[in-house]
Image (tube, helix red, strand yellow):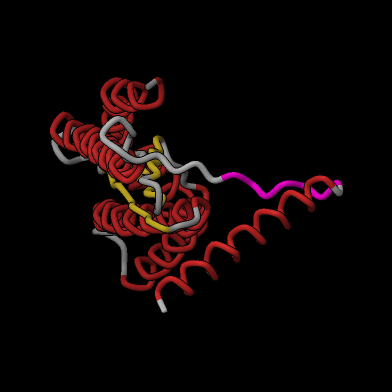
């Protein structure tokens, strides 16, 4: 029985070989060759892929640490007066990862901007009545929304680990934008007391100092990230 089975297998192989030779001779394209490498001298593609993935993850961590270090330096050098945020995004599509990262960064930026505008608003409306204060705050919120929509990233890092894109987006709350919000809101509110307070030497001097710190301290830190 085994001998008969062996003869049938051999005959089948010979027939398949003959069919392939005839097909090639008739002008049909030869089947694609698949070369299989085996043995200790052949590189392991699985190992290479894992190595590339590991290297990509390491680059991603380095990029994230770089942005985190820059944000920490900004907060320390400005004594927490100027805030820095980082948004992250991850997806199999690079565009989706970028959108998610930008959205998360903008959300954090909006929260920080809102907090700082509220702080400045209290100082310029402390002598105003309730009606004037509410009118100013409403205008400040409207102008803030416009500022948030125009906000841009100072640095972005993208890493692909073979399966997913990881994107990190850094944004900074510029004190010049806060000054603009307060001044525009005061003018649009129409309250003379609030406008006078905003134009006072004390308030203008405070803004000038923060803008000077941003220009002299923060921008050089951000330029290092951009040049990289």
Residue shown at the point (30%, 30%) measured from the top left: 41
> Is residue 200 visible to us here?
no
Which corner quadrant holds the C terminus? top left
Taking 141 as reference, is 149 left or right?
right
Q: Quadrant of residue 92?
A: bottom left
Q: What is the x, y in percent for residue 203?
A: 29, 40
Residue shown at the point (13%, 33%) measured from the top left: 76
All told, the count of numbered labels is 0
Q: Nearer the viewer, residue 172 or 58?
A: 58
Q: Give the answer, above or below, for where 173 lies relative to 132.
A: above
In magenta stretch: residue 29: yes
Q: What is the x, y in percent for residue 167?
A: 39, 47
Which corner quadrant holds the N terminus? bottom left
Q: Quadrant of residue 15?
A: bottom right
Q: What is the x, y in percent for residue 179?
A: 38, 42
Q: Nearer the viewer, residue 208 or 226?
A: 226
> Which residue extends farthest right?
26
Q: Quadrant of residue 140?
A: bottom left
Q: Nearer the viewer, residue 178 or 219?
A: 219
Residue shown at the point (16%, 41%) measured from the top left: 80
- The magenta-colored residue range is 27-33
Q: What is the x, y in percent for residue 193?
A: 37, 55
Residue shown at the point (24%, 33%) measured from the top left: 66
Q: Give the answer, above or below, for where 90 lies relative to 152.
A: below
Q: Give the answer, above or below, for where 35 lies relative to 119.
A: above
Magenta segment's dominant SS is loop
In magenta stretch: residue 106: no
> Is residue 219 visible to us here?
yes
Q: Nearer the viewer, residue 20 or 189?
A: 20
Taking 32 as reference, is 181 left or right?
left
């Amino acid at each position: 029985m085994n001998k008969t089975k062996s003869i049938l297998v051999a005959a089948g192989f010979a027939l398949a070989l003959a069919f392939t030779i005839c097909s090639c001779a008739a002008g049909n394209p030869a089947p694609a060759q698949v070369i299989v490498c085996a043995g200790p001298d052949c590189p392991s593609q699985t190992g290479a892929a894992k190595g590339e993935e590991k290297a990509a993850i390491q680059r991603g961590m380095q990029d994230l640490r770089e942005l985190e270090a820059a944000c920490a330096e900004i907060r320390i050098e400005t004594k927490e007066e100027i805030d820095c945020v980082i948004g992250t995004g991850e997806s199999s599509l690079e565009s989706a990862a970028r959108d998610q990262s930008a959205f998360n960064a903008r959300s954090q930026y909006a929260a920080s901007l809102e907090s700082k505008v509220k702080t400045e608003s209290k100082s310029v409306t402390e002598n105003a009545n309730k009606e004037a204060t509410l009118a100013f705050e409403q205008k400040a919120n409207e102008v803030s929304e416009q500022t948030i929509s125009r906000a841009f990233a100072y640095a972005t890092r993208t890493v692909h680990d073979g399966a997913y894109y990881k994107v990190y987006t850094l944004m900074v709350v510029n004190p010049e934008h806060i000054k603009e919000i307060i001044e525009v809101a005061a003018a649009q509110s129409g309250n003379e007391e609030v406008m006078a307070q905003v134009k006072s030497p004390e308030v203008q001097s405070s803004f000038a100092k923060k803008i000077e710190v941003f220009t002299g301290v923060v921008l050089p830190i951000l330029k290092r990230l951009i040049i990289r």
